[in-house]
Image (cartoon, rainbow, N blue to C red):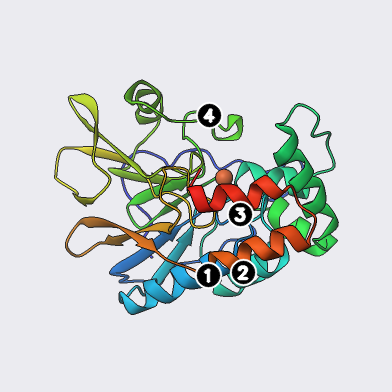
């Protein structure tokens, strides 16, 4: 992987006093089709279905956009699956909350309950792996972050083009992929900033792109199927994929784990 030229990459944030360089993960040099997936949220069935589809689609590299854990019932299994891939992973807010010991009182009660449960069901070693994930990575000639580049650790939500403008001020690569809202969205800066449909997106010279790849394990755009994106570097094309998975098994595991039942219900609604 060649270091990118041009302006310096966005700052890489890590926990105070700890090295931010681990766990790193790499993509292979000369990579052509990269699967970008995130907001897995401990949904093992969705993760396995998405990864199987990515392989069928000829992806030869993988990048995880964070929130490996939280909400659903398979945090350890999802973490180990992602870790074994040795791919770049950036930290999500649930990864941070699950790996810390701070109070979750200010959170939405359902998310907080699930995070307390997640803390108890990860090993200390797994929590350390999550804690040491980087906030931002620059890979090939693009950037990845869980939320936004302007203040990655503030976990800002981008839900309209005005939110996207703040990010573009800190985006020094043509393309940046992110997640966090669980809704696939594409913002293009070409003089002005506009949102375009999250379908097939051609990366055109002279424009910048801030692309939300949606959520593998808890989509919130009304479509229950797992979502991810493929970046074809050779053809400069980003394609979104929606993948069916064994949702009944995921819901059963949530109920058997005594997690809040609405976490199982919302999966079917894609909310
Ligand atoms: Fe998330």
Crowding near pointer 1: few (<14 within 10 Å), some, many (20+)? Answer: few
Mark 2 touches mark 1? (CB < 8 Å): yes
Task: Tell me which label, 4 or 2, sits earlier in the chain.
Answer: 4
Image mark for residue 41: 3
Pointer 3 residue Cβ closer than 8 Å to ligand 1: yes
Task: Tell me what residue is drawn at x 34 percent, y 52 percent.
Answer: 4
Asked whether residue 16 is in view, the answer is no
The circle on residue 249 is 2
Dot placed on the residue nearer the N-terminal end, 3 or 4 = 3
Q: Residues within 10 Å of mark 4 (few under 14, many from 20)?
A: some
- Residue at image position (48%, 49%) is 219
Mark 4 to mark 2 CA distance (whole Å): 32 Å
Q: Secondary structure at mark 2?
A: helix
Marks 1 & 4, CB-CB < 8 Å contact: no
Q: CA distance from mark 1 to mark 3?
A: 15 Å
Q: Earlier in the sequence, mark 1 or mark 4?
A: 4
Task: Give the distance between the C-alpha atoms of the residues marked 2 and 1, in whole angstroms.
Answer: 6 Å
Which residue is the site of mark 1? 246
Looking at the image, in which quadrant does ligand 1 appear? top right
| Mark with earlier residue (3, 2) | 3
Dot 1: element: loop
Query: Can see residue 156?
Result: yes
Residue 204 placed where, x, y %? 14, 45
Q: Quadrant of residue 124?
A: bottom right
**Spatial distance from mark 3 to mark 2, Cα to Cα?**
15 Å
Q: Nearer the viewer, mark 3 or mark 4?
A: 3
Q: Which mark is residue 156?
A: 4
Whether disc 4's CB lies below 8 Å from ligand 1 is answered no
Q: Earlier in the sequence, mark 1 or mark 3?
A: 3
- Is residue 197 rendered to the left or right of residue 113? left
Residue 95: x and y in percent read: 67, 49
Q: Secondary structure at mark 3?
A: loop
């Amino acid at each position: 992987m060649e270091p990118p030229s041009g302006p310096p990459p966005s700052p890489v944030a890590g926990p105070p006093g700890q090295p931010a360089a681990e766990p790193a993960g790499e993509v292979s040099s000369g990579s052509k089709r990269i699967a970008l997936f995130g907001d897995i949220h401990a949904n093992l069935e969705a993760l396995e279905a998405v990864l199987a589809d990515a392989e069928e689609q000829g992806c030869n590299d993988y990048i995880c956009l964070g929130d490996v854990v939280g909400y659903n019932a398979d945090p350890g299994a999802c973490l180990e699956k992602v870790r074994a891939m040795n791919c770049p992973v950036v930290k999500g807010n649930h990864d941070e909350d699950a790996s810390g010991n701070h109070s979750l009182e200010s959170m939405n009660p359902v998310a907080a309950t699930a995070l307390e449960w997640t803390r108890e069901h990860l090993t200390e070693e797994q929590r350390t792996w999550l804690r040491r994930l980087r906030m931002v990575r620059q890979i090939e000639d693009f950037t990845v972050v869980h939320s936004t580049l302007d203040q990655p650790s503030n976990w800002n939500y981008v839900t309209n083009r005005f939110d996207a403008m703040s990010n573009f001020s800190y985006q020094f690569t043509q393309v940046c992929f992110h997640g966090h809202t669980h809704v696939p969205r594409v913002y293009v800066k070409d003089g002005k900033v506009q949102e375009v449909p999250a379908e097939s997106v051609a990366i055109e010279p002279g424009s910048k792109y801030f692309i939300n790849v949606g959520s593998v394990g808890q989509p919130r755009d009304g479509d229950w199927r797992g979502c991810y994106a493929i970046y074809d570097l050779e053809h400069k094309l980003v394609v979104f994929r929606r993948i069916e998975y064994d949702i009944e098994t995921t819901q059963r595991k949530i109920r058997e784990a005594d997690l809040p039942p609405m976490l199982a219900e919302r999966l079917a609604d894609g909310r």
